[in-house]
Structure formats: structure tokens, C-alpha cells
Image (spheres, rainbow, N blue to C red):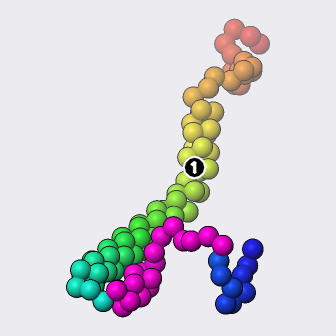
Amino acid sequence: MILKQGQNIKYRPFAFTEHGILMLANVLRSERAIATSIHIIRVFNRMREALLQQQDILARLEALRQRADGHDVDIAAILRALRQLTERPAQARKAIGFKPGKA
């Protein structure tokens, strides 16, 4: 359900956002509330940095995966060719060339 601007929400939020913490510090104005809100904002910033670093790592992993996707098909083709070279033929081949003793 999408609420129109100005309508009250039915349920309270389960978590504060970074901006909500800042607004709370402005309302309370005690030294302890301000110190706590500054600490929480720093934690939000560290969390954001950690998520951005994870995104960088995930992007690199995705690039590696895309690069390696074709390798599976190539390796399977090489293995099939090697198996064909090492297998014995199912039918005996006819001898080609001169056979001594038969004229």
C-alpha cells in the first residue's frame, strides 16, 4: 500500500536511518544524545564504506566469472578430443599395403 504525502503510517519503523538519528540529536539536544548520535552516524558511515568495498569485490568476482564461463566449454572440448585419441577403435581396421605370403 502506498501512502499519500501527509498520511500517517500504520506501523512504526523498526530501525532508524542516518538522517533520523541526526534529527533525533537535534530534538534532544543533550550532550549524551549528541555524542551518541555522532557515534551512530560514524557507524553508518563505516557500514556504507564496507558495503561499497563489498560491491567492488563482487563486481570483480562477476568479471572473473564472465571471463571464465567460456573456459568450461573449451576444457570439455579438449577432454573429449583427448579421450578420442586414447580410445581404441571399436572395429578392427583393414590392413593396408603389401602382405607377404599372399599373391
Left or right: 75 in relation to 49? right
Q: Position of residue 48 (x, y in %)?
A: 39, 75
* Amino acid found under the numbered disc labelled 1: Asp
**In this rendering, would 58 be left or right of 50?**
right
Q: Which residue is more in the foreground, 25 or 75?
A: 25
Which residue in the structure is indicated by mark 1? 72
Q: Quadrant of residue 21?
A: bottom left
Residue 49 seen: no
User: Where's residue 56, x and y in %?
Assistant: 42, 72
| Res 23 quadrant in image | bottom left
- On whether residue 97 falls in the magenta region, the answer is no
Taking the spot 36% from the left edge, 76% from the top edge, the residue there is 44
Q: Residue at x 29, y 81 (%)?
A: 33
Position of residue 76 measured from the top left corner of the image (x, y, whole percent): 60, 43
Q: Which residues are magenta?
A: 10-28
User: Is residue 99 visible from the viewing direction of this image?
Assistant: yes
Q: Position of residue 40 (x, y in %)?
A: 32, 76
Q: Secondary structure at mark 1?
A: helix
Q: Which corner quadrant holds the N terminus?
A: bottom right
- Name the residue nearer the viewer: 73 or 1: 1
Q: Residue at x 68, y 90 (%)?
A: 5
Look at 30% across and 89% down and name the residue there: 29
Quadrant of the image for the C terminus?
A: top right
